[in-house]
Image (cartoon, rainbow, N blue to C red):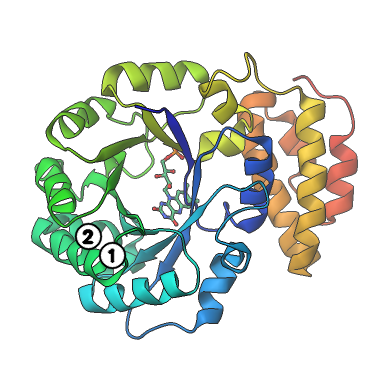
Amino acid sequence: MKQTVTLAPMEGVVDQFMRDILTRVGGFDLCVSEFVRVSQELLPASVYYRYCPELLDGGKTAAGVPVHVQLMGGDASLLAESAEQVVALGAPGVDLNFGCPAKTVNRRDAGATLLQWPDRLNKIVSAVRKAVPDHIPVSAKMRLGFQDKSLYLDNAHAVEDGGAGKLTVHARTKLEGYKPPAHWEYLAPIREELKIRVIANGEIWTPDDFKACKSISGCEEFMIGRGAIARPSLAKEMKGELTDKFQWSDVEALLIHYNQLLLEMKSDHRRAGRLKQWIKLLSRTYDPTGALFANIRKLQDPDHILKVLGKPIAA
Ligand SMILES: Cc1cc2nc3c(=O)[nH]c(=O)nc-3n(C[C@H](O)[C@H](O)[C@H](O)COP(=O)(O)O)c2cc1C
């Protein structure tokens, strides 16, 4: 089986700009958009274009990596109609979110709360599968459970039986949130029982984490989120295309490019926020003492932030 790396959907973090930067760096086979919440009625096309401007470009990033659109909701027929719509708009694939832990989302019958009812997962996946043409991949992304892990295999089977071609598993329950560790050992039974592709996700920050996840889960396909932001070379390292992380000067060049792309937001405030968000995650790899982030934390001017970064730091 071919080893693949997918860039994780991350609301408010992995937008079209981040996808552009990271897929140009390389190592990624696929991106998944931030979730698009479908709750009461069909959304106008403009919403999908906002979450996934790549739809206007053949559903691929500038580097040619496909972007699947992620839908989130609890109403099978509305999701099916929405999937049909987003495919008509040019989405090369549809992913279904069964993992979002946010209280506001779960209270409204969407995201991880659905993991309490495998039959509902099955109904949603099969309605969406039936609604879109056979050649369009339909996948799902789930956690190991809502409060506990008792239904993790039932949920995995429900997704497969519904007709999904692929299942990504974030190896934690909703209750476990983002607290380490991720329970990679639960991925092995899923992979062994299912015939469809199983993608391992959660807590891969370094090549060593990757090796451990691969050996514990037995998976060949991976999705990385925060690790990809904190260490932009990680996907390439996982593919064996690089033997070490980027130098800080390379990362700085990425930040400068990102800053240019962010001009499209037409808001210095939001641009500064996005830069600081990325720098904070980069600190995990490049600035373990936190000194760099402390220097820029209070700055509001994006150009000032980049100037401060230009000073040598301990990398
Ligand atoms: C800020 C943030 C936003 C996220 N947004 C989404 C989302 O829109 N859809 C989704 O399926 N998962 C979302 N996730 C979960 C990630 O895709 C991923 O499953 C999780 O971060 C674990 O992987 P990682 O350890 O590689 O980051 C989000 C995670 C974070 C931290």
Are the residues flagged by discs 1 and 2 in contact, CB closer than 8 Å?
yes
Q: Secondary structure at mark 1?
A: helix
Can residue 108 be seen from the camera position used here? no
| Residue that appears at 80% across and 46% down | 257
Mark carried by residue 106: 1
Mark carried by residue 157: none
| Residue that appears at 42% across and 31% down | 203
Q: Earlier in the sequence, mark 1 or mark 2?
A: 1
Q: Amino acid at mark 2?
A: Thr
Q: Give the image location of residue 57, x and y in percent.
A: 63, 63
Report which quarter residue 58 is drawn in: bottom right
Q: Is 228 left, or right, of 172 in this rendering? A: right
Q: Give the image location of residue 232, x and y in percent.
A: 63, 33
Does mark 2's beta carbon lie closer than 8 Å to ligand 1?
A: no
Q: Amino acid at mark 1?
A: Asn
Q: Quadrant of the C terminus?
A: top right
User: Disc 2 designates what residue?
Assistant: 113
Q: Give the image location of residue 56, x and y in percent.
A: 61, 69
Pick whichever, 255 or 108, lies toward us.
Answer: 255
Report which quarter residue 223 is drawn in: top left
